[in-house]
């Protein structure tokens, strides 16, 4: 007579796996919907025919439809998914590192620096440049974001070379506000057309996404996800405080430098691609924790998928809610996401 031994699977792990599978399926359907929905609505079959035709494994469709699907909408939808996933991941990690529930990817002043770089490029009227496939505006935003990050690190580093979280947050706020002030001054001194373009950029959009710049974002977001998942246990240890993390064998300073650097470089690349998009990196990590708990090996995949789904649908709403006009994506993420998050908070409070 044989005895079968069953190894119990933790409920939280099962829940996290279930949520990941469901969100991955939802993301796939959302991407198809994002390509199909637009000024010229297309059927799912037409979308599939256009993509397979471009890949050379199907009959394809007419050139105009193929151009709309493959060259315009598909890179835009993929950019929205990647930017959403990257911002959500960076927000989750920064909240854990700083112990600050209000931390988001722009915590280190990069939004102000990126805006300053973008407005310099817009007001100076420079042409395109060949930096990682980015336009002049994106390249200037990327460089300025990195410059502001280095300044924040310089302000926040002690004489012993340690990063001080409290000083890091204050330094990020100071540098971000300084960049925002200079941006406002340049906008006031510039013409109205430049001011309008600056406003559109600072409110975020993935309308300009093209295949030439998408490869860089794919590499950046995938590398960030791998690095953060590899440090999942390190991030868990920070929940108990700096001393507890060190007693558990975590090299606190090295881990801080690696994770802050990874999150910051990812954020700079995403800001250069899509401008400043709020809400995603702040609230999505909290919503994911309500679903799967705080352990980062379970949390981070759900955070990335949830951020990707949110931004794909935010982009769909942004370009369809007003015929003939496109809303900035940050407006949509706030208007749609905040009520959902408040509902989640109320339900969690009721269960508690």
Image (cartoon, rainbow, N blue to C red):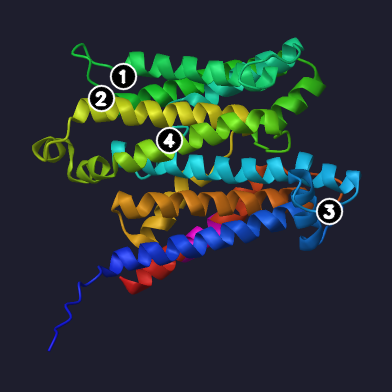
- State the CA–CA distance, disc 1 to disc 3: 58 Å
Image marks 3 and 4: residues in contact by CB distance under 8 Å? no
The nearer-to-camera label among 2 and 3 is: 3
Q: How far apart, in angstroms, are the residues tagged by discs 2 and 3? A: 59 Å
Task: Give the magenta-colored segment's residue range.
Answer: 338-343
Nearer to us of marks 4 and 2 is 4
Considering only vertical position in the picture, is 212 above or below 31? above
In the image, residue 215 sits, relative to residue 178, either above or below, namely: below
Dominant SS type (magenta): helix
The label on residue 119 is none
Quadrant assignment for the N terminus = bottom left
Q: Which residue is mark 2?
A: 164
User: Which callout, 2 or 1, points at the residue further toward the start of the chain?
Assistant: 1
Pointer 4 or 1: first along the chain: 1
Tag on residue 59?
Answer: 3
Judged left or right of residue 258, residue 3 is left
Image-based side of 236 in relation to 327, left or right: left
Residue 85 in sight here: yes
Residue 321 visible to an observer of this rendering? no
In the displayed structure, does residue 89 sit left or right of residue 69? Answer: left
In the image as oriented, which residue stretches furthest toward the bottom? Answer: 1
């Amino acid at each position: 007579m044989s005895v079968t031994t069953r190894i119990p699977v933790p409920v939280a792990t099962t829940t996290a796996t279930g949520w990941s599978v469901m969100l991955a399926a939802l993301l796939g359907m959302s991407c198809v919907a994002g390509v199909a929905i637009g000024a010229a609505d297309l059927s799912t079959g037409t979308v599939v025919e256009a993509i397979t035709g471009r890949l050379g494994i199907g009959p394809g469709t007419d050139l105009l439809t193929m151009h709309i699907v493959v060259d315009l909408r598909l890179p835009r939808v993929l950019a929205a998914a990647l930017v959403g996933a990257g911002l959500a991941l960076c927000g989750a990690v920064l909240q854990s590192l700083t112990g600050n529930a209000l931390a988001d990817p722009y915590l280190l002043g990069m939004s102000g620096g990126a805006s300053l770089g973008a407005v310099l490029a817009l007001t100076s009227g420079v042409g395109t440049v060949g930096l990682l496939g980015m336009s002049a505006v994106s390249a200037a935003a990327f460089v300025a974001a990195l410059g502001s990050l280095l300044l924040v690190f310089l302000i926040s580093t002690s004489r012993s070379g340690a990063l001080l979280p409290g000083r890091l947050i204050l330094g990020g706020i100071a540098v971000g506000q300084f960049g925002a002030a200079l941006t406002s001054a340049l906008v006031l001194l510039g013409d109205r057309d430049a001011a309008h373009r600056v406003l559109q950029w600072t409110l975020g959009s993935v309308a300009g996404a093209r295949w030439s710049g998408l490869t860089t974002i794919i590499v950046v977001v995938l590398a960030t996800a791998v690095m953060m998942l590899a440090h999942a246990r390190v991030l868990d240890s920070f929940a108990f405080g700096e001393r507890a993390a060190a007693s558990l064998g975590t090299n606190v300073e090295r881990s801080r430098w690696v994770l802050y650097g990874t999150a910051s470089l990812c954020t700079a690349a995403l800001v250069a691609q899509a401008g400043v998009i709020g809400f995603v990196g702040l609230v999505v990590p909290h919503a994911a924790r309500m679903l799967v708990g705080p352990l980062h090996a379970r949390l981070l995949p759900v955070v990335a998928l949830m951020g990707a789904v949110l931004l794909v649908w935010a982009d769909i709403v942004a370009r369809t809610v007003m015929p003939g006009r496109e809303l900035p994506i940050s407006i949509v993420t706030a208007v749609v996401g905040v009520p959902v998050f408040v509902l989640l908070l109320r339900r969690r409070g009721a269960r508690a």
